[in-house]
Amino acid sequence: KVAAMIKDHGYPMVLNVVIHRYNIGHMKEILEMAEALGADYIELANTQYYG
């Protein structure tokens, strides 16, 4: 609902996704979800290992 509200108000919808070992295999589904939500931009971020 929020994604649709953003689009209805004329703002660009940006989907930010953090990629990690548990979701890297689901990139196709993530991109399909972004398309279904009408995302104008997709930001993919890699997790950083610290420690």
Image (tube, grey):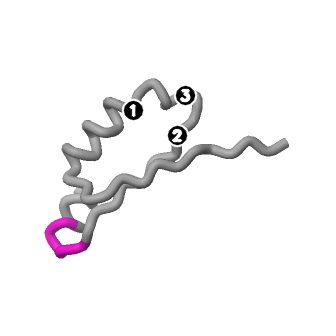
Task: Give the image quarter of residue 12.
Answer: bottom left
The number of callouts visible is 3
Please state the horizontal and vertical placement of residue 1, each as a whole percent of the image: 23, 56
Please state the horizontal and vertical placement of residue 39, each as a whole percent of the image: 26, 55
Helix, strand or loop under label 2: strand
| Residue drawn at point x = 58 percent, y = 29 percent | 21
Disc 1 and disc 3: Cα gap in Å? Answer: 11 Å
Task: Give the image quarter of residue 36.
Answer: top left
Name the mark nearer the viewer: 3 or 2: 2
> Mark 1, residues whose alpha carbon is within 10 Å: few (<14), some, or many (≥20)?
few
Question: Would you say 7 lies left or right of 31 here?
Answer: left
| Residue annotated with mark 3 | 22
In the rendered view, tell whether residue 16 sits above or below residue 25.
below
| Label located before the other in sequence (1 or 3) | 3
| Residue annotated with mark 1 | 27
Disc 3 and disc 2: Cα gap in Å? Answer: 8 Å
Question: Would you say 20 lies left or right of 14 here?
Answer: right
The type of residue carrying mark 3 is: Tyr
Helix, strand or loop under label 1: helix
The type of residue carrying mark 1 is: Met
The kind of secondary structure the magenta stretch mainly shows is loop
Please state the horizontal and vertical placement of residue 41, each as a whole percent of the image: 31, 58
| Residue annotated with mark 2 | 19
| Residue drawn at point x = 49 percent, y = 30 percent | 24
> What range of the chain is rendered magenta?
7-11
